[in-house]
Image (tube, rainbow, N blue to C red):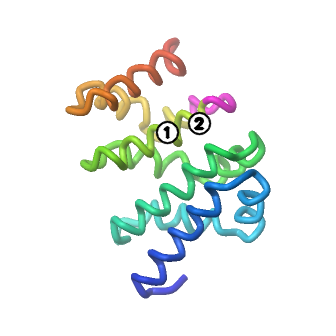
Amino acid sequence: QSTKYKIRKEASWVISSITAGNSDQIQCVIEDHLIEPLIEVLLSKEENFAIKNDAAWAIVNATSGGTPDQIKYLVTHGCIQPLCDLLSCLNAQVVTVALKGLENILKTGSYSACVEEAGGVSKLEDLQRHDDTKICNQANHMLEMYFRDQ
């Protein structure tokens, strides 16, 4: 909640380190209501890019090590929209992180409609023409795997 850049940056980084742990550690972050502020950071138009990057890592780490119920919690608290928004970022590393988070979410359940509602499918289609071959391949894979019938 601080307005100071350094505190916001460090807090986001610390939370991303915790969510890189196991599902018990992710559960502590959830129970302490730290997911909601991270999503607010990601949705903010005014937030500093470095802080958004750390917030994105925190969410994506939680999708990597979280249980299906924890991932459902992330989805119901609005993580899909900001991850889809990051697919338009000019920074290839951030796009790669967002792709990873979305794929982790899609692997756990039927969230393809949520990704589509957030504009993710059209952004994945755009990424098929990205300069980075790995991003192109990942976008193509996700479209084939999760959106083939749409």
Determine which quarter of the picture holds residue 63.
top right
The picture places residue 30, in percent across and down from the top left corner, at 73, 62
For the record, the magenta segment spans: 107-113
Residue 134 lies in the magenta stretch: no
CA–CA distance in space, label 2 to label 1: 6 Å
Instruction: Note whether 97 is above or below 150 in the view shown.
Output: below
Dot 1: element: helix
Q: Could you tell me which residue is drawn at 36 percent across and 43 percent down?
A: 95
Q: Nearer the viewer, residue 17 or 80?
A: 17
Determine which quarter of the picture holds residue 50.
bottom left
Question: Which class describes the residues within 10 Å of circle 1: few (<14), some (14-19), or many (20+)?
Answer: some
Q: Nearer the viewer, residue 125 or 63?
A: 63
Instruction: Note whether 31 is above or below 142 in the view shown.
Output: below
Indicate which disc residue 15 carries: none
Do residues under tags 2 and 1 come within 8 Å of each other at their CB atoms?
yes
- Amino acid under disc 1: Lys
Q: Could you tell me which residue is drawn at 54 percent across and 61 percent down?
A: 39
Q: Nearer the viewer, residue 126 or 5?
A: 5
Q: Could you tell me which residue is drawn at 54 percent across and 75 percent down?
A: 11
Q: Could you tell me which residue is drawn at 55 percent across and 82 percent down?
A: 1
Q: Which residue is mark 1?
A: 100
Instruction: Note whether 9 is above or below 133 in the view shown.
Output: below
Q: Is residue 14 left or right of residue 141?
A: right
The picture places residue 6, in percent across and down from the top left corner, at 42, 83
Q: Which residue is mark 2?
A: 104
The picture places residue 123, in percent across and down from the top left corner, at 35, 34
- Amino acid under disc 2: Asn
Instruction: Note whether 107 is above or below 144 in the view shown.
Output: below
